[in-house]
Image (cartoon, helix red, strand yellow):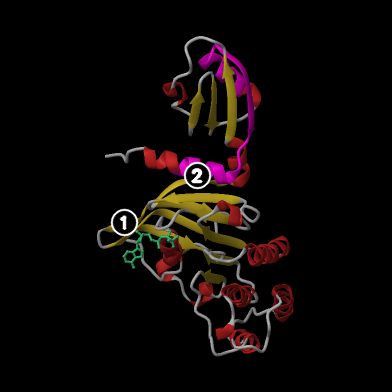
Amino acid sequence: MNPVIEIQKMSCRFGNVEAVRNLTLEVPVGSVYAFLGTNGAGKTTTIKTLLNLLQPSAGTARIFGVDSTHLGPPELARIGYVSENQQLPEKLNVQQMIDYCRALYANWDDALCRRLVERFALPMNRPIRGFSRGMKTKAALLVSLAYRPELLLMDEPFAGLDPLVRDDLVQGMLELSEQENWTVFISSHDIDEVERLADHVGMIDNGVLTLSESSDSLRTRFRRVDAIFAEGPPPTPDLFKDALSSEISGLSARWIENHYTDDEELGARIRSRFPNCQAWSSSPLALRDAFVALTRAQRATPPAL
Ligand SMILES: Nc1ncnc2c1ncn2[C@@H]1O[C@H](COP(=O)(O)OP(=O)(O)OP(=O)(O)O)[C@@H](O)[C@H]1O
């Protein structure tokens, strides 16, 4: 099946600032893709380009096989969009907003809408202008989901929300993602926010994609290793140059492997590289730690000339 999103060598420039550089990634049908990056990494620019709110300065972005610059009403009706600073009709209450949106979308699903209203426990008759930030995000999500978009683009939807509201939203989305065959592309600063949802992860730093792969592959490939060495010359940092990060303290060392497959293969590698290693153990690495280590490693590598 063709990917829902296909970005090919896309760059986006604002004057001298190249916000996105030579970005290539694919989002498979039915996946929940977390697009992670720190402030200013290029996440919003990418999402806006997918929606044709911005145009690439080079390369292409395609949604449902259609070039983003040619998206029309048929494609847009299949896409939901929730952003951090979502504009909502502040004067309306939730019921009025639902009535307004229902008229715009042929696919509007009243039963799903009722379920979401219940799930998010939103007051129906109070003007949206008096809502808290979390309530506004829920309202935005409600009207973006009730027309059953095949693709949901979310730009930092959880930013600034307290853990309870975030959990509520994540739970609501998890329930839906089990029932619907939809694709979600969600940007975030923090893997913790989206880890439970994501089955694919992309990481962008300073406009450059540093990885794009399934969460399962990421969980397998990153591993923390602790080792103890026999008396003799202590391990030196250059022995760990292939590791993502390493800390040496006397005769013990701890490092992050980013090409782990299994303990047998790792053991053989440790024995050949560190003949005086006495004991070692490996343990899974949280995705958050992998994200931090990768971003640090990326920043420590001088850009190619
Ligand atoms: N309209 C604009 N004019 C000039 N520069 C811009 C514009 N929009 C974004 N940029 C720059 O492009 C880069 C990427 O910005 P972008 O908003 O895509 O990052 P982001 O990853 O979404 O960041 P954040 O997490 O802070 O929202 C930044 O350096 C930003 O200053």
Percent of width and height locating residue 159: 53, 64
The foreground one among 296 and 4 is 296
- Identity of the residue drawn at 57% across and 55% down: 33
Percent of width and height locating residue 72: 47, 75
- Identity of the residue drawn at 36% across and 66% down: 55
Taking the image as shown, residue 298 lies to the left or right of residue 276, namely left
**Quadrant of image for the N terminus:** bottom right
Residue extent of the magenta highlight: 266-295
Q: Which mark is residue 156?
A: none
The foreground one among 178 and 76 is 178
Mark 2 closeness class: few <14, some 14–19, many ≥20 residues within 10 Å: few
Q: Secondary structure at mark 2?
A: helix
Residue 2 visible to the viewer:
no
Percent of width and height locating residue 40: 39, 58
Residue 70 visible to the viewer:
yes
Label 1, label 2: how far apart the Cα atoms are = 23 Å
Please tell me whether residue 17 is drawn above or below residue 264 in the rendered image: below
Residue that label 2 marks? 292
Residue 166 forms part of the magenta stretch: no
Residue that label 1 marks? 18
The foreground one among 38 and 212 is 38
Q: Looking at the image, do the residues carrying marks 1 and 2 touch, with CB atoms under 8 Å apart? A: no
N-terminal label among 1 and 2: 1
> Which image quadrant for residue 101?
bottom right
